[in-house]
Image: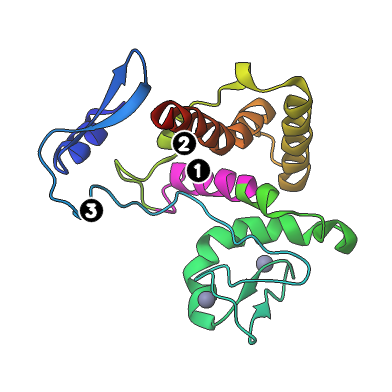
């Protein structure tokens, strides 16, 4: 972990530690009052969970009767010009890739695939300094998450690999690392999995 992140957390009364029975965890270094916010953080990337019959704005995640499709890729929706503008830097890269797909394939781009596409786009834009980077906002924090691949069953591993392949086919970039994308698919799932295990321990 970088010193910059450690000091950003210290300012909030927090520190990252490794405990033998819990693994990597966030500890407090001062007392917090009941109801006090310990930490709040914008997601590195996020995508509305849109389905064929229910869509939300890509900027504010609100459902609205007045959603308009991005006129270029026709995959994402916006409620207003303001939301479209706020998302444009990141969507521009994604939009370029999505627009190259045949129309029928664009419908098959699920929210999970889009999440990984945006993850790649955002890390790329940050590495080119087109989007600001800070101690609390950088791809290194995603890289640091544990994928727990050894605990994933073979069938699921094949599925992650297939999905990572699709992401690579959509993005068409030479520097894509399929293994890294497959691990990224596992990261949010494994934190739920680990969370469940801990929850069981607490309630038993
Ligand atoms: Zn909106
Ligand atoms: Zn678009």
Question: Where does residue 21 sit, x and y in percent of width and height?
Answer: 36, 15
Q: Label 1's element? A: helix
Answer few, some or many: residues within 10 Å of disc 2's Cα (few below 14, many 20 plus, some between 14 and 19).
some
In the picture, the disc for residue 142 is 2
Which residue is pictured at 71% across the width and 71% down the height? 54
* Residue underneath mark 1: 123
- Left/right of residue 99 with respect to residue 149 in the rendered view: right
Name the residue at 69% across, 59% down. 96
Asked if residue 73 is among those painted magenta in the image, a careful observer would answer no
- N-terminal label among 1 and 3: 3
Question: What stretch of residues is rendered in magenta?
Answer: 116-131
**Figure quadrant of the C terminus:** top left
Q: Is the C-beta of the residue carrying label 3 under 8 Å from the nearest atom of ligand 1? A: no
Image quarter where ligand 2 lies: bottom right
What secondary structure do most residues of the magenta stretch adopt? helix
Q: Mark 3 — residue?
A: 37
Front-most of residues 79 and 62: 62
Q: CA distance from mark 2 to mark 1?
A: 10 Å
Q: Who comes first in sequence, dot 3 or dot 2?
A: 3
């Amino acid at each position: 972990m970088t010193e910059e992140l450690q000091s950003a957390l210290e300012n909030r009364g927090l520190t990252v530690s490794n405990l033998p029975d819990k693994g990597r965890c966030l500890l407090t270094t001062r007392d917090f009052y009941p109801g006090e916010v310990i930490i709040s953080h914008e997601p590195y990337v996020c995508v509305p969970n849109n389905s064929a019959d229910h869509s939300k704005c890509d900027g504010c995640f609100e459902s609205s009767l007045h959603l308009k499709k991005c006129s270029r890729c026709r995959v994402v929706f916006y409620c207003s010009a303001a939301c479209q503008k706020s998302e444009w830097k990141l969507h521009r890269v994604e939009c370029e890739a999505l627009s190259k797909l045949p129309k029928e394939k664009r419908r098959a781009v699920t929210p999970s695939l889009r999440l990984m596409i945006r993850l790649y786009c955002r890390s790329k834009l940050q590495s080119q300094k087109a989007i600001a980077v800070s101690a609390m906002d950088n791809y290194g924090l995603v890289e640091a998450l544990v994928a727990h691949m050894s605990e994933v069953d073979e069938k699921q591993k094949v599925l992650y690999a297939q999905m990572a392949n699709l992401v690579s086919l959509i993005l068409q970039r030479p520097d894509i690392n399929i293994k890294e994308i497959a691990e990224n698919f596992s990261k949010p799932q494994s934190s739920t999995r680990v969370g469940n295990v801990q929850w069981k321990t607490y309630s038993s």
